[in-house]
Amino acid sequence: MPAILRTEDLSYTYGAGTPYEMRALDTVNLEIERGETLGIIGHTGSGKSTLIQHLNGLLKPTAGRVLLDGTDIWQEPSKISKVRFRVGLVFQYPEYQLFEETVEKDIAFGPRNMGLGEDECAERVRGALHFVGLDENILGSSPFELSGGQKRRVAIAGVIAMEPDVLILDEPTAGLDPRGRDEVIGHVLEYRATRGATVVFVMHSMETIARSVDRIVVMERANIILSGTPREIFSNAIRLHAAGLSTPQVTQVFARLRGRGVDIDSSVFTVEQALAAVLAKKGGGTVA
């Protein structure tokens, strides 16, 4: 099955031709498969946010192309808004983007711009609320009266209401407590499972991304340096450290145990896998 999104030699330079010129992306080639959950990690300034802003046309490449279902998204610049309906982007701290008088109006903003009728918009709003775990009794409330976690969910619902084929989230759990973090990730993954959508996470939390995605790409100095499953990526601790990144804490603990002579599977990157490894060790079994 062909990739839903693909970049070909994608490059972008901020401030081109000025003393402040900076190469943010340098011939990046990336394929995002239909229905997969992809994680993008990298040190601050590695190019992560610049990359995802190209995937729905918020930025136009200096060179190279972005293809959606095999078609260059800038082939017809006047239709770039249709790309943004299909590839939804949720910025870091999206609650700061809330602006309407009521929750209902805020969530319905995207569907109305798509030209949908009021009945369809109302259905989209209710469906989006379900996916982010909010009750319909808040629809008439001002979004600015909600708690921080509720604001985050309303902002995400506003993108989900457009029913994008690809949902991209930049640090969606920043500033949330562990419970709020798990709830937000769970709701996004429910949307993916129910709609068959593709999800892209940009995160700094190695623990969260390790248990949330099918594949991880690592960025450094404006390009992709590694791509693979969480196990493959986090097994390459030396390369990650060289890029200014770390492995999940539980992986570090098990590596130290292994280094001290404990005969235990150290290729774990989630608490659940760690528990299974300990139980297997206790029972004399092995972990697949």
Image: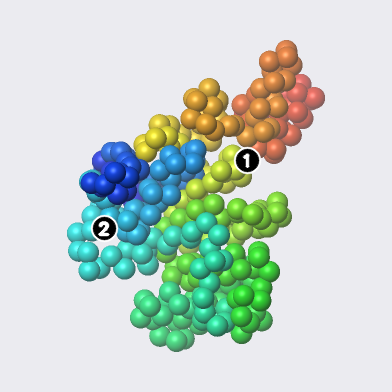
What is the x, y in percent for residue 36?
45, 48
Q: Secondary structure at mark 1?
A: helix
Q: Which of the pair 72/27 is nearer the observer?
A: 27
Pick out the residue farthest to the right: 282
Q: Is residue 207 left or right of residue 26?
A: right
The residue that label 2 is drawn on is: 73
In the picture, residue 282 is in which quadrant? top right
Q: Distance from label 2 to label 1 (Cα)?
A: 34 Å
* Circle 2: residue type: Ile
Pick out the residue farthest to the left: 75
In the picture, residue 47 is in which quadrant? top left
The residue that label 1 is drawn on is: 207
Q: Which of the pair 153/128 is nearer the observer?
A: 153
What is the x, y in percent for residue 144?
62, 75
Residue in the picture at 65% in, 79% down: 138
Quarter of the C terminus within the rendering: top right
Pick out the residue farthest to the bottom: 118
What is the x, y in percent for residue 25?
33, 42
